[in-house]
Image (cartoon, rainbow, N blue to C red):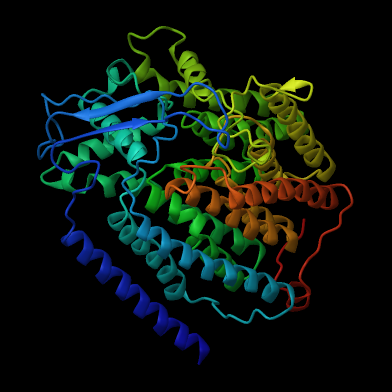
């Protein structure tokens, strides 16, 4: 009876989400503060105050003389994009009224997450989804159409959306000379291919009318793909009921869709590449893992954070053959991605691009709720001395310590199944204690935590998934909806403290699992034999 009620409820919600999405897209005005007719907006970081720290700020003006025509091109248009994609003085197209709805949704969902933790831990989970494809497919479709509705309703972060749109247009017109024609681009080449296709699609008929939605679509699809990966991995270690439930927790996670559907950022796409890379590593398919790790680095410089995990496994195997396979796979991937953009460029152009991107924000923290935010060093120059060393030196020291500990965990565990745990340590440690961290850089932690839970089956990892989701959401929410415009106040400080505490707690949990073999499993799993394998 309960299963029928669930199926009918999901069918109703799915139908409703489809109707609302189609209706909204049909009546979509396509006009946002960033793209409505002729406009001229100035984006400035403005001066900093005591709460934000000090240091030079960038200014930029984004102007367009004529609106784009139907094909998304305009020979007379002139774009001047900001030299920095940092804080634009609080200007965002997103209306604050939607922030209230999202916060209300997040409060309810995170409460359900907490209740789910206790249900799983205390043998209260009785949802039966065995062999019911409709329920599983419905969950994915509801997640997709829900995101589509949000994407069409909320404009997103105007600075990022504007830059992605201008890059898509530039790439679609002449991708081979993209970096020559688009000096504002600080992204490595991989995602430019995605923007190229978006630009081409938007030039068909009247589809430029949906440019905002099209720009968000790759990340929306990446959300669903990541949820599916979580479901498939869950099936290897738990029953379909548990794996579908855990996947649903990711599909409807506010920290996930606020980034892709509301903000319009691409961290979901990046995270998808990372978890695929780590999955292949856990399955000891080194050459495939190398392909996706390289792809992640070629999409965002933050991909380098996860590269040590691949190194750990290569060293662990002590196989020259596997080392060569991984090297060749990475090299071939890099050549395929880079060569089209390298024609006519300086031989070292890609290294200069990375150097430019990494040095663009020389601050202890860039709205990241972390150790430096807790110290009041948000937008304080990273060269500023703190205790004995500069913030940047402390950040480098913490990167080394984080990587060393992550390697220690990998070695002690003697199991590639700890790949997700090591990757989680990397991102949590670097975000919390390294400099130059943006509010979105902790985003992959949620997916890595839930996948680490599926592999090591420790309920504390599930708890970390819930807590990292909450802190990630709050960090992105406060930046997206402008609450950091004037000060790094009480709640950001509390969340910063929470992130520091979570990083420290993760160290303890990882040590327990890998070094002491202490795994806190729910007795429900043990008694019902829902665990298929053990670490």
As drawn, is 390 to the left or to the right of 157? right
Check the image and report above or below for 392 versus 402. above
Q: Is residue 253 left or right of residue 403?
A: left
Which residue is at a point 49% across and 54% down the rendered structure image? 256
Query: What residue sits 46% from the left and 28% below the top?
Result: 47
Residue 52's spot in the image, x, y percent?
Answer: 55, 35
Q: Nearer the viewer, residue 153 or 313?
A: 153
Residue depicted at x 52% and y 44%: 271
Residue drawn at x 70%, y 39% is 429
Q: Is residue 223 visible?
A: yes
Query: Front-most of 3 and 286?
Result: 3
Image quadrant where one finds the C terminus: bottom right
Count of labels shown?
0
Q: Residue 452 location in percent, x, y?
A: 67, 53
What is the x, y in percent for residue 288?
A: 55, 37
- Of residues 160 and 135, the one nearer the viewer is 160
Q: Nearer the viewer, residue 306 or 163?
A: 163
Q: Quadrant of residue 290?
A: top right
Q: Residue furthest bottom?
A: 1
Residue 248 lies left or right of residue 388; in this view the side is left
């Amino acid at each position: 009876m309960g299963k029928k009620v669930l199926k009918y409820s999901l069918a109703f919600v799915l139908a409703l989400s489809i109707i609302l999405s189609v209706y909204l897209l049909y009546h979509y005005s396509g006009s946002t503060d960033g793209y409505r007719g002729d406009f001229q907006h100035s984006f400035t970081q403005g001066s900093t105050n005591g709460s934000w720290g000090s240091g030079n700020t960038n200014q930029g003006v984004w102007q367009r003389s004529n609106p784009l025509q139907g094909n998304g091109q305009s020979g007379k248009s002139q774009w001047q994009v900001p030299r920095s994609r940092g804080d634009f003085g609080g200007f965002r197209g997103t209306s604050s009224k939607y922030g209230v709805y999202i916060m209300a949704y997040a409060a309810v969902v995170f409460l359900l997450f907490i209740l789910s933790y206790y249900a799983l831990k205390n043998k209260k989970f009785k949802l039966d989804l065995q062999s019911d494809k409709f329920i599983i497919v419905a969950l994915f479709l509801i997640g997709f159409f829900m995101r589509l509705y949000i994407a069409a309703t909320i404009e997103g972060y105007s600075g990022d959306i504007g830059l992605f749109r201008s890059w898509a247009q530039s790439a679609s017109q002449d991708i081979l000379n993209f970096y020559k024609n688009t000096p504002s681009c600080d992204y490595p080449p991989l995602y430019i291919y995605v923007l190229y296709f978006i630009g081409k699609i938007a030039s068909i008929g009247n589809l430029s009318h949906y440019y905002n939605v099209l720009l968000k679509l790759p990340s929306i699809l990446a959300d669903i793909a990541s949820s599916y990966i979580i479901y498939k991995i869950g099936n290897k270690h738990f029953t379909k009921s548990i794996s579908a439930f855990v996947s649903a927790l990711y599909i409807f996670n506010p920290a996930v869709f606020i980034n892709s559907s509301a903000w319009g950022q691409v961290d979901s796409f990046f995270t998808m590449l990372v978890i695929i890379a780590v999955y292949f590593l856990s399955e000891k398919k080194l050459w495939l893992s190398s392909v996706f790790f390289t792809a992640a680095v070629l999409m965002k410089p933050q991909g380098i954070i996860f590269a040590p995990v691949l190194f750990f496994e290569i060293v662990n195997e002590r196989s020259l053959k596997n080392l060569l396979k991984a090297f060749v796979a990475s090299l071939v991937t890099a050549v395929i991605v880079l060569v089209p953009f390298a024609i006519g460029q300086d031989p070292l152009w890609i290294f200069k691009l990375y150097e430019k991107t990494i040095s663009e924000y020389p601050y202890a923290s860039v709205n990241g709720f972390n150790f430096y935010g807790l110290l009041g060093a948000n937008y304080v120059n990273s060269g500023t001395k703190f205790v004995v060393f500069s913030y940047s030196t402390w950040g480098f020291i913490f990167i080394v310590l984080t990587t060393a500990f992550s390697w220690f965990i990998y070695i002690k565990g003697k199991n590639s199944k700890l790949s997700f745990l090591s990757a989680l340590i990397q991102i949590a440690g670097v975000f919390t204690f390294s400099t130059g961290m943006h509010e979105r850089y902790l985003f992959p932690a949620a997916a890595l935590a839930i996948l680490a839970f599926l592999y090591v089956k420790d309920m504390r990892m599930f708890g970390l998934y819930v807590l990292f989701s909450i802190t990630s959401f709050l960090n992105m929410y406060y930046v997206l909806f402008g609450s950091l415009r004037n000060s790094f106040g009480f709640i950001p400080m509390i969340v910063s403290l929470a992130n520091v505490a979570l990083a420290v707690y993760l160290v303890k949990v990882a040590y327990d699992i890998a070094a002491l073999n202490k795994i806190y499993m729910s007795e429900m799993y043990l008694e019902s034999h829902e665990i298929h394998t053990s670490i």
